[in-house]
Amino acid sequence: MNTNAYFGIMLVMILIWIHEKKNKECVAAVRLRNKKVEGDKMEAMAKQFVGKTCLVTIFGGSTVKGVLREVQDHALLLEKKGKPQIINLEFVTCIEEIPQKNKG
């Protein structure tokens, strides 16, 4: 092959590389936007548990039990035995209300 062929192949490879790089940047931007939308939905759904005793499951299977006091800025404020705990909502996989036992 002559040098013009090598130059042409290199030019095509560089253009493909630039195109792929731009495509990856676009995909990353879409994923970031989708993550924000999902986070906003999770925050809105978590607000229905404010004031209730809940069992919060965190990514990895850990659980925390307490009264959900506030949901704000993608964080939960949970009160456990009078002490506040802040949990990052991005790591929460499940929130369930614990029914109060009736004494009587």
Image (spheres, rainbow, N blue to C red):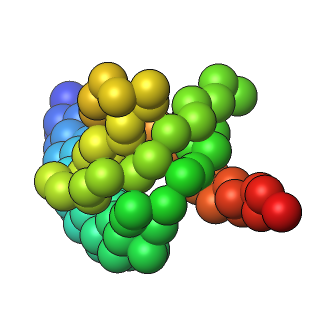
> Considering depth in this image, is 66 or 10 the residue closer to the camera?
66
Place of residue 90 in the rendered image (x, y in percent of width and height, measured from the top left): 39, 44
| Residue appearing at x 37%, y 36% in the figure | 79
Q: How many marks?
A: 0
> Considering depth in this image, is 103 or 1 the residue closer to the camera?
103
* Residue occupying the far front of the picture: 104
- In the image, residue 103 above or below residue 65: below
Place of residue 83 in the rendered image (x, y in percent of width and height, measured from the top left): 32, 24
* Residue occupying the far right of the picture: 104
- Image quadrant holding the N terminus, namely top left
| Residue appearing at x 44%, y 26% in the figure | 81
Q: Using residue 72 as the reference point, say whether residue 30 is left or right of it.
A: right
- Image quadrant holding the C terminus, namely bottom right
Place of residue 20 in the rendered image (x, y in percent of width and height, measured from the top left): 30, 51
- In the image, residue 32 above or below residue 40: above
- In the image, residue 14 above or below residue 24: above
Q: Is residue 24 visible?
A: no
> Considering depth in this image, is 16 or 97 the residue closer to the camera?
97
Place of residue 35 in the rendered image (x, y in percent of width and height, measured from the top left): 34, 60
Q: Is residue 84 visible?
A: yes
Query: Splitting the image into 4 quarters, where does residue 31 fall?
Result: bottom left
| Residue appearing at x 39%, y 62% in the figure | 51
| Residue appearing at x 37%, y 40% in the figure | 78
> Considering depth in this image, is 39 or 57 the residue closer to the camera?
57
